[in-house]
């Protein structure tokens, strides 16, 4: 039996995941968490084989949570579930110890397949992402501009790309508006751009959002 923690800040998403996974006789939902602190508290106090983890978690990004989870319980398998396509966060997630990455528009069948494959000790990534990674190696492409950013800076970039204001981003990430302004300035500097409009154009052109 694979014991699973569902970590997502949207209750409707957790309910959907529970409905899908509870149909499987070898999968058991043992808990839910809606923010970073709840995830870490649960992991510290419970035996958990597997976590489905959202990228956008209140209190800390999903990638920051992933890093801490692997420190506390290194053997716990983590599948990142995100609204963002794989070319946005997948590489960073794998570098931090994730065992798989799926977008939230994946089918229930693919989700179950990923959980079982990861639980068997393997990694899971979509065929499309595999092809992209292979192509990048074969063509020896330079790193895209957004790969120069830290995880938090990338998260802010994607929210800018969604057209969110500084106040909306601050509320979403539980940070101050001045902090968001600092991140925005760093992003512009690292990517050699001058405006939010240029950042939005870059995000759309590079398909970093769904």
Image (cartoon, helix red, strand yellow):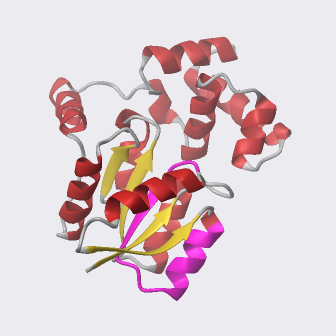
Please state if 134 lies on the left or on the right of 164 as rendered: left
Identity of the residue drawn at 57% across and 73% down: 40
The stretch of residues the image draws in magenta is 37-56
Q: Quadrant of the N terminus?
A: bottom left
Q: Quadrant of residue 4?
A: bottom left
Q: Position of residue 114 (x, y in %)?
A: 24, 56
Residue 185: in magenta span: no
Please state if 86 lies on the left or on the right of 45 as rendered: left
Residue 45 in the image: above or below residue 25: below
Q: Position of residue 119 (x, y in %)?
A: 23, 69
Q: Is residue 96 visible?
A: no
Q: In this view of the protein, which residue sits in the foreground, 105 or 78?
A: 105
Identity of the residue drawn at 60% across and 44% down: 152
Residue 112 in the image: above or below residue 210: below
Count all numbered tags in the image, as a single digit. Answer: 0
Q: Quadrant of the C terminus?
A: top left
Please state if 52 lies on the left or on the right of 191 as rendered: left
């Amino acid at each position: 039996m694979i014991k699973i923690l569902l970590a997502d800040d949207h209750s409707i998403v957790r309910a959907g995941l529970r409905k899908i996974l509870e149909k499987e006789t070898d999968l058991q939902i043992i808990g839910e968490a809606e923010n970073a602190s709840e995830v870490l508290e649960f992991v510290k106090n419970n035996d958990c084989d597997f976590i489905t983890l959202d990228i956008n978690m209140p209190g800390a990004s999903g990638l920051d949570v992933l890093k801490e989870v692997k420190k506390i319980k290194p053997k716990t398998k983590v599948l990142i579930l995100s609204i963002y396509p794989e070319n946005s966060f997948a590489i960073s997630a794998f570098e931090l110890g994730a065992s798989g990455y799926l977008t939230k528009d994946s089918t229930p069948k693919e989700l179950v397949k990923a959980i079982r494959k990861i639980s068997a000790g393997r990694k899971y990534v979509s065929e499309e992402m595999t092809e992209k990674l292979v192509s990048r190696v074969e063509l020896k492409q330079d790193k895209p501009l957004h790969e120069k950013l830290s995880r938090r800076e990338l998260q802010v970039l994607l929210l800018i790309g969604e057209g969110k204001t500084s106040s909306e981003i601050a509320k979403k990430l539980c940070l101050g508006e001045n902090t968001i302004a600092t991140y925005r300035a760093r992003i512009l500097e690292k990517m050699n751009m001058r405006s939010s409009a240029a950042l939005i154009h870059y995000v759309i052109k590079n398909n970093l959002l769904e």
